Image (cartoon, rainbow, N blue to C red):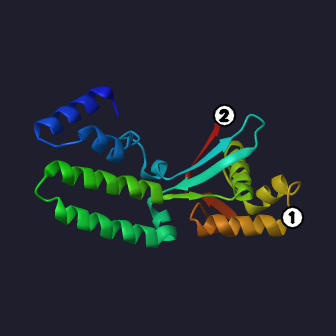
């Protein structure tokens, strides 16, 4: 969030007579990534893979709203909590906005699912194959990865990634459902 926006929000909150506005801002505001209006909806669904200096995977995460199904209990608790907070803050638009922002922040947090290290290696291999050929097949993946693991482990990984809706398997072909973003540190 820009400092100008923070200052304007702080000014509005002070004019509205809110106490502890700085604490409220620090506790409840989160900076959301800017989404370009021309982006496809698919680019919002990402797999982020972080590599260390040696090229080893440090973290791999799938980020998309459908991942909420894996954390349904937490989501329902947050929804109930936010509903109660909304009901008690209907008289103050600022409190209402803060509750809504806090709820959206929690949704964003819950829509993130960690991916196993080997599954991330499979995704990196798929990413490279897609850049080279454009078409992904199970046979290509097995050929590239057979040095690392047996076919059974690759099949288990593909099953995991399909369960997470990261990929779709159809007749030996692999379709990536998310954009893969690889970052080196």
Image: 37 above or below 160: above
Residue at the spot x=41%, y=67% of the render?
Answer: 75
* Residue on which disc 2 sits: 185
N-term-proximal mark, 1 vs 2: 1
Where is residue 137? Give x, y as percent.
72, 59
**What x and y, as percent, mark residue 62?**
56, 55
Mark 1–mark 2 CB contact (< 8 Å): no
The picture places residue 117, in percent across and down from the top left corner, at: 72, 55
Give the residue number, with chain letter if any, for mark 1: 150
Count of marks placed on residues: 2
Residue at image point 18% right, 65% down: 87
State how far apart marks 1 and 2 are (Cα): 30 Å
Q: Residue at x 29, y 63 (%)?
A: 82
Instruction: Tell me the crowding category of disc 1: few under 14, some 14 to 19, or many 20 or more residues within 10 angstroms, Cα based.
Output: few
On-image quarter of the C terminus: top right
Depth-wise, is mark 1 or mark 2 nearer the camera?
A: 2
Locate residue 43 relative to residue 116 in the image: left or right: left
């Amino acid at each position: 969030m820009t400092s100008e926006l923070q200052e304007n929000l702080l000014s509005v909150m002070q004019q509205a007579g809110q106490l502890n506005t700085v604490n409220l801002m620090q506790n409840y505001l989160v900076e959301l990534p800017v989404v370009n209006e021309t982006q496809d909806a698919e680019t919002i669904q990402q797999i982020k893979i972080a590599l260390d200096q040696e090229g080893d995977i440090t973290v791999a995460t799938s980020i998309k709203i459908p991942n909420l199904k894996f954390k349904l209990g937490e989501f329902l608790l947050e929804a109930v909590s936010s509903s109660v907070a909304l009901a008690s803050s209907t008289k103050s638009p600022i409190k209402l906005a803060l509750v809504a922002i806090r709820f959206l922040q929690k949704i964003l947090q819950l829509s993130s699912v960690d991916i196993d290290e080997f599954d991330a290696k499979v995704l990196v291999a798929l990413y490279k194959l897609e850049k080279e050929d454009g078409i992904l097949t199970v046979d290509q993946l097995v050929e590239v990865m057979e040095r690392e693991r047996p076919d059974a482990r690759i099949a288990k990984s593909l099953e995991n990634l399909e369960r997470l809706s990261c990929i779709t398997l159809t007749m030996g072909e692999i379709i990536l459902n998310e954009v893969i973003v690889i970052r080196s540190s």
